[in-house]
Amino acid sequence: MGNNSSRVTAQDKAILDLKLQRDKLHQYQRRITVLTDKETAVARQMLAAGDKKRALLALRRKKYQESLLEKTDAQLAQLEQLTRSVEFALIQKDVIFGLQQGTRVLRDIHAEMGGIEHVEKLMGETADAIAYQKEVSDMLGGRITNQDEDEVEDELAALELEVNGPAVLPNAPDTKLPQAVVKEQQPEIHEEEEELEPQPERRAVLAS
């Protein structure tokens, strides 16, 4: 089974035939050009030989070949124009086909959406729902007391705890203090102990 995109259509074959005919005309023109050059060379030779009659005949044949060359030029121009017209028509055909496809897709989308009336109805229902929600919120906001509001917030906190679980507290720092800081703190502790310890004179007084 071949791919449809690689299949040669009738339009493709027509364009190919036009281009082949164009190539044949180009080849024919080249042959005519060679013949006219030969006839010119023959006319020179005949004149050099003193045969003016045969020189004139060669130039007449050359003139006839040149008339054929002019006809092929006109045919080539027509073929070129026809080939361009066919190719442009095929492009237009593809564009029109694409527009048709796009229009059909848009029509199907609009059908799925239910048309403009359905969209307007849906937008109206949405607006009514929003207005109703606002009305309920305003009504509840005017009737709920501060105590009720506190109870609502407590219930919300309980629901958050149920849904999300207890809040995770940050871990306490476990870094150790530097040795220098510990050493600086130790003399202060000794001074306090010395102040708390009674002096010998005071002990004697106390003992008497």
Image: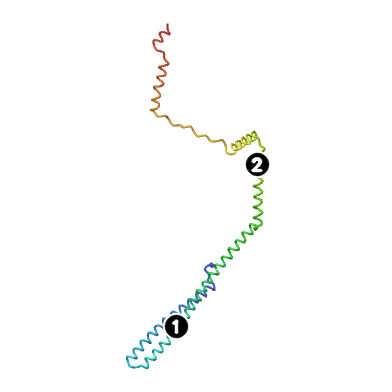
Q: Residue furthest top?
A: 208
**For mark 1, what is the residue?**
70
Q: Position of residue 106 (x, y in %)?
A: 60, 61
> Mark 2 or mark 1, which has the lower sequence index?
1
Q: Nearer the viewer, residue 91 or 168?
A: 91
**Label 2: which secondary element:** helix
Q: Position of residue 139 (x, y in %)?
A: 67, 41
Seen at 66% across and 38% down, the residue is 142
Which of the 4 image quarters holds residue 9? bottom right
Label 1: how many Cα within 10 Å (few below 14, some 14–19, many 20+): few
Q: Nearer the viewer, residue 177 or 204?
A: 204
* Type of amino acid under label 2: Asp
Q: How many marks?
A: 2
Q: CA distance from mark 2 to mark 1?
A: 93 Å
Seen at 41% across and 87% down, the residue is 63
For residue 127, side relative to residue 197 (left or right): right
**For mark 2, what is the residue?**
138
Look at the picture and state if 67 lies above or below 163. Answer: below
Seen at 53% across and 73% down, the residue is 11
Q: Nearer the viewer, residue 121 or 57?
A: 121
Look at the picture and state if 92 lies above or below 22. Answer: above
* Type of amino acid under label 1: Glu
Q: Position of residue 49 (x, y in %)?
A: 32, 92
Q: Position of residue 84 (x, y in %)?
A: 50, 74
Label 2: how many Cα within 10 Å (few below 14, some 14–19, many 20+): few
Look at the picture and state if 63 lies above or below 26. Answer: below
Which quadrant would the N terminus be assigned to in this image? bottom right
**Colour scheme employed for the rendering of this structure:** rainbow
